[in-house]
Amino acid sequence: MHTWNLDSLYSGLDDQKFINDKVLLTEKIDSLNALATSLDVVSVEKVTEVLTSRNELNALIRTLAAFLSLNESVDAANNAYKSELGQLMQTLASSRSAQAIIDQYLANISNLDELLNDEYINDHAFYLQEIIDRKKYQLPADQEALIAKININGVNNWEDLYDYITASYTMDYNGEPITLTKVRNLAYSADPKVRKEAYEDEIAGYKGIEDALAYSLNSIKGHVNTMVELRGYEDALEMTLISSRMQRSTLDALFGAIDASLPKFRAYLQHKAKLLGHENGLPFYDLFAPLVKSEEEYTIEKAESMVYDSFKTFSDDLANLVQRAFDNNWIDYLPRDNKRGGAFCSNLPMIKESRVLHNFGNDLGSVVTLAHELGHAYHGHKIENHHMLNTGYVMPIAETASNFCELILSEAALKTASRTSKIELLENMISDATQVIVDIYSRFLFEQSVLDARHNQFLSADDLKALMLDAQRKTYGEGLDQDVMHPYMWACKGHYYSSGLNFYNFPYAYGALFSKGLYAKYLEEGESFVSKYENMLAHTTILSTEDIGTLAGVDVSTQAFWESSLGMLTDMIDEFMELTKEGL
């Protein structure tokens, strides 16, 4: 009960369809490899063949990979899924050279306007134009294939080293070994003594791994700088912005508004510090300290009812989608041994469904998380009728629907909440916002400084700690106790340790604030905004971030838009501080 059903994909590893699809995958890769050798002319027929082959292969890969990774996420001790995933990656490796050749073929199309007279090709206009526009950053196909092969035992291993060390390393906590994940989770403890001791032991524990992680980070960022130079990008940020379909001016507008809002967030942090008995700003170990705890218990059934009822106030389409999720067992709710922590949603456009992993805790936060993940499912629902090559949305847009749905639920809950529940909900929302605004800004500044410095030097662990503290001082300012910050945030955030995803930070701020700006638009326009919002979601995979905003009636390239979005948060801070001005 309360587990997901994956039979829409396969019933198990012994399902004949799963076995047949693995054989089919090999056949389709063989066909793709053969196709790559016959790309002599650009024609409607040949481009159609390429697009069809990629669509079919993409759907098959995603079906197999989703089934295996979803099973592994709830049964990590089952090595059969790991083994099958490894075999799948090996099978896919045999298509790398062909994929690089096909990319070159599509990038060299010079008569796209003529080809777009064909309806099927026209459906892929954005996909093709993007490949053509990025042609200047491509290397010759043989070099692309060589880099991919070298990376397997090169930069990929540095990424894997980070994952292995941080997952397996144990540090001392009260005389007992504890994993990094578990000691960091103690930051949410209701006991102030536990929070402080966990922080101190965490900081001390990094000493044992700081040099290995510093080598890993230096190697990855050095590799990134090399690839930026080889491909002809201005810098790693330009490479990230292009892959994010975003103009640098839009990012500048976002951070301009964030920078102007920092005094309000610092005031919130100082207020929280005083509520907890601190006089010199909030010590880092109390950033996530719970202030109050509602006595109300939330069952899964109550959570589903709250989500459905609040979503129905927005649209029947949204409410009907989540009802499908409840009725058809799309959600794996409860924590259990060998199930990964946290929560996520996996869109499955090839079967027009989604799956949600949750670790439900019978509290209000778990209800909000459910709404958040089902927002991702709704986003998947709005793009499920696209061709497979048109189902990928970029990171800045990825959190739009989820945050929007979280707002729908939270705003509804606030209307009927008791004082204690209201304090809890407001503080949770503001605390989360502080992370995706203030902390994310510090991470962006840190990563930028690391990439800049890495051009000329190897950065020791001490260098990295100094850069991190400098970034935190610039964003948190007097909101944090300057003597109790976190110099090792570079060591505990895996986002830095990916050569393919640089600046995996600002998209969180973009998504959080974009959704708030859209919600403000909904409050302003009412029901007439709903169809505009749904149309926007449907186009998030085939437009730039700026054009997506235009569809919703907002201009994301202006600082004024982001300031209006932040206005929702500063209003929350004012309400929270007024509600707690006499204490809790």
Image (tube, grey):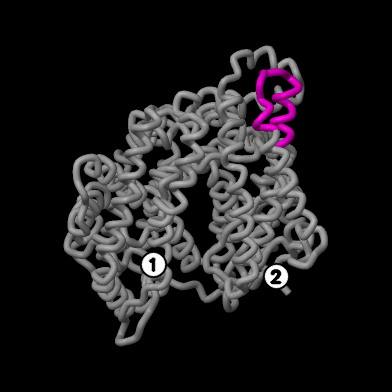
Tell me the amino acid under the disc marked 1: Thr
* In the depicted structure, whether residue 209 falls above or below residue 132: below
Alpha carbon separation for disc pair 1 and 2: 29 Å
Q: Residue at x 38, y 71 (%)?
A: 180
| Residue at far right of view | 16
Residue beneath the point at 65% across and 32% down: 36
Q: Residues within 10 Å of mark 1 (few under 14, many from 20)?
A: some
State the mark number for residue 370: none
Residue 570: horizontal and vertical position, in percent?
Answer: 38, 46
The residue that label 1 is drawn on is 166
Q: Label 2 near label 1: C-beta < 8 Å?
A: no
**50 up-or-down from 523: above or below:** above
Q: Position of residue 321 (x, y in %)?
A: 73, 51
Instruction: Tell me the residue that label 2 is attached to.
Output: 3
Say which residue appears at 70% left-offset and 42% top-offset.
30
What range is drawn magenta here? Answer: 35-53
Residue 523 at what x, y percent from top left?
57, 39
Magenta run includes residue 47: yes
Q: Is residue 433 visible?
A: no
Disc 2 crowd rating (10 Å Cα; few below 14, some 14-19, many 20+) is some
Using the rendered image of the protein, determine whether residue 496 is visible from the camera's viewpoint: yes
Q: Nearer the viewer, mark 1 or mark 2?
A: 1
Q: Nearer the viewer, residue 411 or 373?
A: 373
Q: Is residue 219 left or right of residue 387?
A: left
For the C terminus, the image quarter is bottom left
Magenta region, main secondary structure: helix
Q: Residue shown at 32%/77% (left/top)?
A: 171
> Identity of the amino acid at label 2?
Thr
Q: Secondary structure at mark 1?
A: helix
Q: How many marks?
A: 2
